[in-house]
Amino acid sequence: MKRSYSQGYSADKNNLMRVPSDHKRSAHSPMKSISKILAALLIIFSVSCKKDLHNTPIGIITEGIAPTHASVVYSVLSSYQLLSSTLNIIGNWGWDNGTVLRNDFILQDIASGDMQKKWNPDGDQAWMDQFGDYSFTASNPGINGQWSYDFDGVSRSNIAIGYLTDDKLTASLGIDDATKKYMLGQIYFLRAFYYFDLVNLYGDVPLLLAPLKSFADAYSVAKRETKANVYIQISKDLDLAKSLIPAGKYSSSTEKWRVSQGAILAMQAKVALYNQKWSDVVSIVNALEGLNYYSLNENYFDNFSVAKEYSENEVILSYDHESLTTPRTGNGLCALAGWGFIAPTTNFINAFEANDPRLGYTVDVSKQNVYKLFGELNDHNKGNDDAPSNKIYIRWADVVLWKAEALLETGANAQAIALINSIRQRARLTVTTDNTYAPAGTLPDRNIASTDKAQIKDWLIQERRVELGFESQRFNDLKRWSIAKTVLGGLGKNFQDKNYIYPIPQGEIDKSGGSITQNAGY
């Protein structure tokens, strides 16, 4: 496995901002002011306060330098970082513990049967293959890596919340009320996001709501809270975020990647969806529609194009990767593509109807290019460990299909079919990668008069797979529909009932002295 590249960036030591080097300019958007400052202050937070993350209990920190205005601001930025696909955010080439980068593509896309590890299978990082055949154990690096990323996100969020809810501290640092509320709103959202991922991956998990300053603190919370109670906290955090984030499609005109009202509403709708609160899904999405912030892009690929970032109509939540910054913030997942990783399964390719333009924009099989990942219709970012292509978490097509599902579950069949057809229409009218249009008859509308709920549900399942392919949505979909065993068994995979949730990392159980228990069957 290739381990590093020439970095190609420089630092302005006077202001510690992320800056592109003089000899090579990023193709991405201009710098975004405050998000680049104070990288050197990371020593105050979470992982960097630990000698070895994986030898200490989850969420533990140590006493550090007294907080300053700058370090409080940076605590918010630091909490975003665990959403990124940037390499080595919490480790240094930690393949053996799954921390080289976020493992969504492994635990979601490979596990769903849509993706295989490599175009030409080999023994490199064989632990990834175990998600494809369901032979993983609680000691698998991917199990540990995702847990580590999400809980580190929780830990960093708790540090920021601790600062920002200390009125005496914020007053002494000159942080005005509006700024404090805005930062808090972002952090509450991020904590909710990380916990949403955790409960859907692992089920019951420890619930950490404050910084842990000692091993005694850490062990006191080293126990699993019920998934239902974690969801209650997620909803509380999202409600708080909603009350604090300013209105507008973007909460910041200069840093459009920050958490917005739209992202909060979308997460509230997703939480309702995963808890089968169908009427809530419809009402929340209706409220989001009423803001007129989002619509389907005319061209499907505009969602993923580096050139269209923050100027298109559909993306609601994404992590803003940039090339050539200090510290690095590029999309390291593109590096893995250069090493032969990230390939479609034959079954995924065959899921696309004839002439569907979305297949070509997702992956070019003949050239072995995953364009959705690269953000360009070429291979310039293939092998680039510092690529500018964003990581998309929520976009409008996803939300439209949530509403379609909720409508179907409440008996509004025709309305559900109409929404599914809107996604198909955009797809068939998208100019293809060859700059032509799909022939007449491509992706015909589903029969709006159908009253067969099972048939309509199949249409929905199909549409979500091809529309959102390689966006780390499929496995969660299969699980929440309770069809994972049937679908994956049909692909010859050894999926068992226990696999509806992943095991708790064995290392976390060991570090807790057994107070954190294992999921059944592992």
Image (cartoon, rainbow, N blue to C red):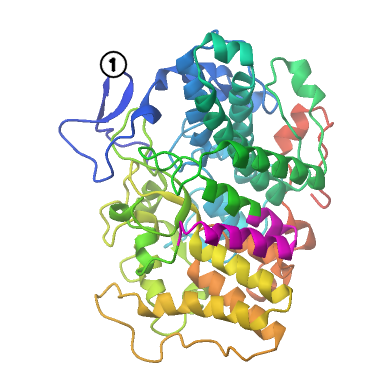
Task: Inspect the magenta stretch and tell me whether residue 261 lies in it.
Answer: no
Residue ID for mark 1: 13
Residue 241 x, y percent position in the rendering: 61, 39
The amino acid pointed to by label 1 is Lys
Q: Seen in the image, is 134 located left or right of residue 69?
A: right
Determine the main secondary structure of the stretch shown in magenta. helix
Residue 251 x, y percent position in the rendering: 46, 41
Inspect this view and state whether residue 132 appears: no
Task: Inspect the magenta stretch and tell me whether residue 271 lies in it.
Answer: yes
Q: Vertically, is 337 above or below 386? A: below
Find the magenta span and give its range. 269-294
Q: Vertically, is 440 above or below 333? A: below
Residue 7 x, y percent position in the rendering: 28, 32
Count residues near mark 1 (Cα–Cα under 10 Å), then give few for <14, some for 14-19, many for 20+.
few
Q: Vertically, is 384 above or below 412? A: above
Identity of the residue drawn at 33% across and 45% down: 387
Identity of the residue drawn at 54% across and 60% down: 290
Residue 247 x, y percent position in the rendering: 50, 44
Question: Image quarter for residue 417?
Answer: bottom right
